[in-house]
Image (cartoon, rainbow, N blue to C red):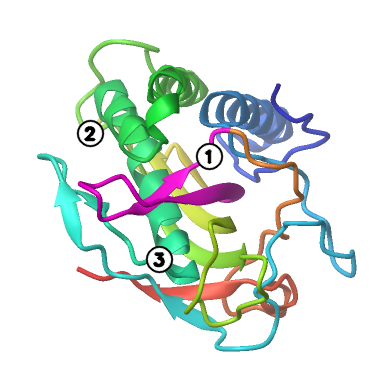
Amino acid sequence: MPPAVEGPVLDVDLGPPGRAFRRRVLVALAVAGALAAALCVWLLPDAGPGAPSASGAGSSGSSGPSWVVLARPSGYHGEAGYPVGFPRTTLGAVSAAAAALEASWTLDSGRAEQAAELYAPAERRATARDDAGAAVRGWRETLGLPPDGDLPTGAALRTEPIGVRWNDGAGSSTGDSAGEEVLVSLLVRVNATRGTDESGPAYSAPLAVNMLMIWRPGVRGGSGDWVRALDPPPAAVPRIAEPGTREFAAAGWKAVTGSPP
């Protein structure tokens, strides 16, 4: 059961001023519903300034560095080159979550289903595959594209991680250690285009999500890796804010300053 969305969680304008608010609300509800149901990530209203952190909402806090560089994977899977084999550290879990989100949020159902299986526990891969297909249809419909079949030339959706928080149960602020589970909060910038015939992005907005990452020692040929739980605990996402602002720091985000090649 997806969580209730009590208000717009995205701020995006797809139309002229006269229709901006109505479109903003419709897009927010459509995207939130599709992603919460199909990707099993929690899209909840942020806690707002001064609100106490919800249990498991991420606790990178103000200690430690205010930025991170994502961890390097040990390998890449398939023709698409999906990053796999992240270190068993909190930062490894954060990096695996970012890789899974980037691979799964796409307008190509085949790629989304492949990525969903790759980053899901073995016993839940069939469910992950079905959910990924539903998520792609949700994104396509939100952008006014055909829910199935070929896309217009140039139509694409991409995510860029710009902020992270985590709760590893140990209060680590550096990401050097980790237990069996890490609740990761990701702040990403999502950009989408309907095709080369239209100028400018059809959709551009920051979006915050929570993902529960679990360590599975038997995957990747026995080397172990982080995979995404399909049933994360309910937890309020941190407040959405732009990197470099006081609001960003107050929400406990750490800026993502780079990704390994």
Query: Which quadrant would the N terminus be assigned to in this image?
Result: top right
Seen in the picture, residue 150 relative to 84 is either above or below; the reply is: above
- Seen as rendered, the residue at the extreme bottom is 64
* x and y percentages locating residue 101 in the rendered image: 42, 45
Q: Residues within 10 Å of mark 1 (few under 14, many from 20)?
A: many
Q: Are marks 2 and 1 in contact (CB under 8 Å)?
A: no
* x and y percentages locating residue 238 in the rendered image: 71, 59
Seen in the picture, residue 144 relative to 86 is either above or below; the reply is: above
Q: Residues within 10 Å of mark 2 (few under 14, many from 20)?
A: few
Residue at which label 3 appears: 88
**Which residues are the magenta region?**
206-230
Q: Quadrant of residue 156?
A: top left
- Please, what secondary structure does the residue beneath circle 1 have? loop
Of callouts 2 and 3, which one flags the residue occurring earlier in the amino acid sequence?
Answer: 3
- Residue 119 lies in the magenta-colored region: no
Kindly identify the residue that appears in the image at 79 percent across and 29 percent down. 4
- Please, what secondary structure does the residue beneath circle 2 have? loop
Kindly identify the residue that appears in the image at 57 percent across and 75 percent down. 254
Image mark for residue 229:
1
* x and y percentages locating residue 151 in the rendered image: 26, 20
Query: Which quadrant would the C terminus be assigned to in this image?
Result: bottom left
Q: CA distance from mark 2 to mark 1?
A: 32 Å
- Please, what secondary structure does the residue beneath circle 3 have? loop
Seen in the picture, residue 166 relative to 213 is either above or below; the reply is: below
Give the residue type that dot 2 points to. Gly
Q: Residues within 10 Å of mark 3 (few under 14, many from 20)?
A: many
- Residue 227 lies in the magenta-colored region: yes
Image mark for residue 154:
2
